[in-house]
Amino acid sequence: MTKKELNNHRLFSEANHEALHFVTRRHFLKDSVTGLGAMALGSLLAGCDWLGSKDKSAIVFDSANPLAGKPPLFPGRAKSVIYLHMAGAPSQLELFDYKPDLIKLDGQDCPQSLLEGKRFAFIRGVPKMLGPYAHFAQRGQSGAWISEHLPHLTTVVDELSFLKAVKTDQFNHAPAQLLMHTGSARLGRPSIGAWASYGLGTENSNLPAFVVLTSGGRNPDAGKSVWGSGFLPSVYQGVQCRSEGDPVLFINNPEGISNDMRKASIDAINEVNQRSYKEFKDPEILSRISQYEMAYKMQMSVPEAMDISDEPAYIHEMYGTHPGKESFANNALLARKLVEKGVRYVQLFDWGWDSHGTSAGDSLEISFVNKCRSVDRATTALLLDLKQRGLLDETLVVWGGEFGRTPMQENREGKVQAYKGRDHHAEAFTIWMAGGGIKKGTSYGETDPVGYSAISGQVSPYDIQSTILNQLGFNHETFTYEFQGRNFKLTDVYGRVINEIIA
Amino acid sequence: MKIKISKKLLLLSSTLLTALIVTTSLIGHKKVDYNTEVKPLFNKKCISCHGGVKKESGFSLLFRSEALGKTESGKPAIIPGDPDKSEMIRRITTNDPEDRMPYKHDPLSDKEIDMLKQWIKEGAQWGDHWAYVKIKPVAVPDISGGFFGSDASGRKWVKNEVDNFIYAKLKEEKLTPSAQAEKATLARRVSLDITGLPPTAEMVKKFENDNQPEAYERLVENLLASPQYGERWTAMWLDLARYADSKGYEKDGYRSIWRYRDWLINAFNSDMPYDRFLTEQLAGDLMPNPTNEQLIATAFSRNSMNNDEGGTDNEEFRTSEVIDRVNTTWETMLGTTFACVQCHSHPYDPFKHEEYYKFMAFFNNTRDEDVPGDYPVLREFKEEDQKKFDFLKKWLLENASNEQAHEMMTFAKTWQPAIYSYHADNFINSQLSEVYLAFRKDASCRLPEVPLNSRSQLTFRYTSGIADGKWEIHIDSINGRTIGTSILPLTKGWSIHTISITPTEGVHDLYFTYTNPHAKKGTQDNLAVFDWFSFSSAFPGKGTSGYDSAYAYYTHLIVADAKQQTPIMMENPKEMFRPTHLFIRGSWLNKGPEEQPDVPHSLNPMPANAPKNRLGLAMWLTSKDNPLTARTMVNRIWEQLMGKGIVETLEDLGTQGIPPTHQQLLDWLSWKFIYEDKWSIKKLVKRIVMSATYRQTSVVSDEMLKKDPFNKFYARGPRVRLTAEQIRDQALAVSGLLSHKMFGKSVMPYQPRGIWRSPYDGNVWEKSTGEDQYRRAIYTYWKRTSPYPTMLSFDATAREVCLARRIATNTPLQALATLNDNAFLEMARHLATRMEKEGGNDAAMQISKGYEMTMFHPVSREKLEALLKLYNKAVIAFEKDKDKACEMINRGNDNTDPGKAALILVANAMLNLDEFITKN
């Protein structure tokens, strides 16, 4: 190390030390009744169990280095998560939940028993049943039913674990997406990715712990709140990587500033800041110095990490990627790159799955088939690519929407629609998981003969969240954050780990 | 025995200090204090099973009456005076694992058990938490001498009574206060604190040259009087009021509510007393003859989120808004987290489950119902129309009964009371299009339970693309008596019409039928769409002079385009009263008994003359007996100025909050705030910034850092990072770009492309032009699903819900924003131009000047050297790379002056310095 690096190193550790002070102070104030010494030591020696502490929920928030890599509360099966969210909610009845009885009922009036006491987003009066607009076949060793719309995915069904009876209690996009990712249909709670980066930090200090990638031309309906940090410190919110402009907001120098000049100016800023530190002795200045250093490292590494153009041709062929344009395929490949580099949680949103059938642009016949085509190859490639790199075992991949679609054809405003489409449906839909310690080639949960509601193995968004946390090494019941005088959990008082799909 | 236990403790854990203190207190037979000793132990070890949420075995420790009451086993848990007979003591000491409490957890320590025994022996007295006890006058600590003899240094340091409290505590902690900060630093600090902006060079110079003792007070007075004061404190209040320019959720459409933001600025600037400030926001609409401004103040409660997404249950989201208003009121005005009482009694604090709903009843009877129009709104008329309104008002007051006059004026201004069309049902060839009632060919539907009460007119807002539709209104059934008929004219967009109806007593279901001779066979088009219906009496005063023109004005004003429409609070008329029920376990679908409006019994009762509505609630809240209102605000102001609250948890002064560092000071300031300053916020701010405590230098010694790393005892001045708003405003100010334009619709300064990508609406970020690009941050358009990114990275929030306290973080994304955001580069360019202009020809002088422009004191040699080194490096680089130089200067011409480009880079660096983004 040069003298300067040594000096910086020292400043770093000093800053960290100060930050620990900060953290322990809260504990001290809270626990002063039972003893200052025990608590302070407990935090300082987090991870060492010699005090016999049973409080395994304690995550140390280190304000100087909030994203430092941390071990989970118990050894997890997955080191990272790639969550592929099809925003708008894809139809399970055209993809995974094969309902031959529904073919027979096609065009008939929906029985009153399915309508009484129910609310729908757009269905009014008595709608007609709608048979699946897809051909299904059993695939793989597991014999999973899967439709022709996902020809590539059929080749890897034996890697997947289907949850066929997911039930949510929200039938509007924004609240349902919030529920799926933050455990609450209202705004203001941290997203699961934020919880993961709070609990685990990042393995790569040059990259954010939680990255969000969007495709389909729009952000998801609930906006940035679905990857927000809620009441957790804002550093844990998802960092949105963009296809247009800077890959991370403000990561590139403005025109006129070269990397060398940026380096020189950060050096100058930090030199002045060190003078200020000598003057004020405020430890926060040291942490600012380290953040500017980190910012520079990010400037140097993020554009490269976000650039998929240097991937070999066969990889591009595999994913169907075209560097430089916004697409789900590009994001899927990027997700693999990021996970490989130590990012904990990669959240993809692909917008445009809201197949109501009011026009060709949201029809099951046209737009839905196109959407399937745009994700099928890349999703499959992602699984195969992770597998060939030995990463699938430690990467949990989740695929799904925020709710399902009705077995009835939508009749918005009581009218016959020009195209085939289905309304929002909260009662039952399909989500699949793969990798990260999840069973291969299995299916859990079943719906009734028309796919309206669960008849067995029903799971909730909370159960899915509990399972994801479990695979990362956290018990959803003890992984808490204190806010407004309460220990908050991602899953509130709900949630059950879906052991049936865990390998 | 006690001593032996303590020794054991010493060995077990390294709690040397605590153990010693406890041992001493036990030996000394000091009476056990419920609040500081018993309650924290209950909260930690017992209350999760025996509290407000769960009452295992019928036993709860929340209230004394419950704790001493009957348990399921029949054995009293606590018998005051008799620990040995108290079942609780037996259960915490028994060896039987099935019986021993805390159940399946580690036993209490012997020390804790002894403490509880002693407490029961002493009578098991409950104590009220300090924050729930009325504020009493507090004696200012005497630091003139006392035990240690004369204390000249203390006397010399103290500037006002605040300092007595601080000094007394410092002395206890064996800390010495710091000297006053240098004048320039102090001027910058106090200017940023009071106005949110840095001082001007002239202000600093004047202050530095003014050697009279009142120099600082003069500076403070000037700052308090500047219009920027209101803007700065409004920025604080907007987080509490969860103010945004959009409604939230999926659609997140525009909401025109900026008049409320402007109301706040005016209220702060005119130093509206805090009790009135709160009253107008909570209940401006219920004050006698409310002004438009008082109505706008109630938009405080209307900042809750609206869900306009298709198919949403309006009642669900209306309920969620009401709950949000309750929680916001508590967190903002009462420093208490009330949200948990929604589902069960407060687990720790003395609030019962039903009390949440009694409180909610104050808010649950308003006209808003989560409809896209954000009704009720105040329609502020354009100037010409306002004259008409003034005439109408005068005429009505002279020629109609007060009640009639009021009814007509209210309707003209607000279109209320109205029944929103989504209440319709029994649709045949009709339906709800979004939330609007739509008729197709040969349509019918029902509007249930309409209070007609002999009214003779129906006014409605509708749109129809086809003429001659015949709309009939039948009573009680589709074939019932027709009480009104209208041939609906073709409209261009929304239109408002009035028809006469046959006056009918009482409440009835109305059945609508609609036919249209021009409707094509088989058409499924919506032929007429309705927004709302309002039943009213006829315009009064027929036959009196001026009737014709008054009525003409009235009908004109109803349809006139308003200048602004601001959502406001408005109470339901009697006939539309909405009862409030308790929600069992917080679920709005699971309703319990009806509740009447009331305040929690553990706090002061409602004043005798207070009505049981929001106005009465405001009277209760601003009563001198309310223990929380003043403390909450004083604590908040202290936090804004000193960096941290006296109670650090601004959102919770109760037992779950962090205990206060200087409770006596908080109470003293609160008492002054109410009784002496008559709720003047400016006086409160002044009182704090005039203290020696505030004026101290923030330079810290190693020793002080060791003794008090977080400045809990205030032996030095505050040093905190500026807020997101201050960071933007300050950079604009020093670069000379800042516009001082106040008020008006929110603006859209530069932000990178592609930030807003919201589904289903055409809303786009359209960069403002002219000075609107450089307005203060509080005027920046705040979209909940996509807030302004640079401010977001500096810990601003989406303003979805009330936020009492921003936690400052320190992240690389912040550095990236101020380094690379083009908005900041543009400010650097302008700063560099100022440096050139005012600094002379020499780069060192220009840089020194730039430093003074940003920091108001001369640059040190070392800092200048570092910046100059950057400058010299940059000059060489820009000489080599003319293109980069040209881009850097960005004058739209071919200026490639490497010196200028290098100066911009230095200016960019200066806007990133720690001392620049920090209040020193």
Image: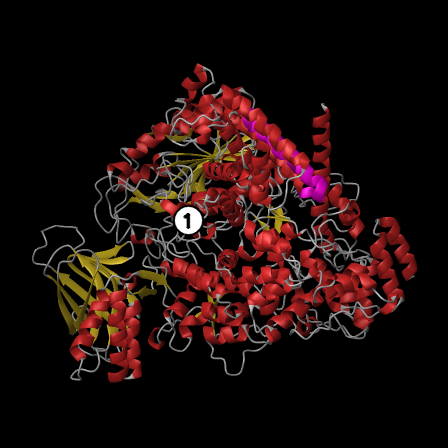
Does residue B452 appear to the left or right of B813 in the view shown? Answer: left
Question: Residue A103 is drawn in which quadrant?
Answer: top left
Position in image of residue A321 (x %, y %)? 40, 22
Examine the rendered structure and indicate whether residue B530 appears above or below residue B747.
below
Position in image of residue A339 (x %, y %)? 54, 28
Instruction: Based on the picture, tell me whether residue A265 belongs to the magenta stretch.
Output: yes
Report the residue at 63% width, 47% height from top: A478
Position in image of residue B869 (x %, y %)? 62, 28
Q: Nearer the viewer, residue B541 or B184?
A: B184
Is residue B237 shown to the viewer in this render?
Answer: yes
Examine the rendered structure and indicate whether residue B540 appears above or below residue B111.
below
Question: Residue B355 is drawn in which quadrant?
Answer: bottom right
- From the image, give the main secondary structure of the stretch colored magenta: helix
- The residue pinned by badge 1 equals B783
Quadrant for the N terminus of chain B in the image: bottom right
Q: How is the image coloured?
A: secondary structure
Report the residue at 58% width, 26% height from top: B872
Q: Nearer the viewer, residue B616 or B705?
A: B705
User: For mark 1, does the 10 Å Cα neighbourhood hold few (<14), some (14 to 19), or many (20 or more) residues?
Assistant: many
Q: Amino acid at mark 1?
A: Lys
Figure label count: 1
Q: Nearer the viewer, residue B901 or A442?
A: B901
Instruction: Based on the picture, tell me whether residue B619 belongs to the magenta stretch.
Output: no
Is residue B589 shown to the viewer in this render?
Answer: no
Report the residue at 82% width, 69% height from top: B118
Position in image of residue B736 (x %, y %)? 48, 45
Report the residue at 43% width, 63% height from top: B263
Q: Secondary structure at mark 1?
A: loop
Bounds of the magenta span? Answer: A260-284
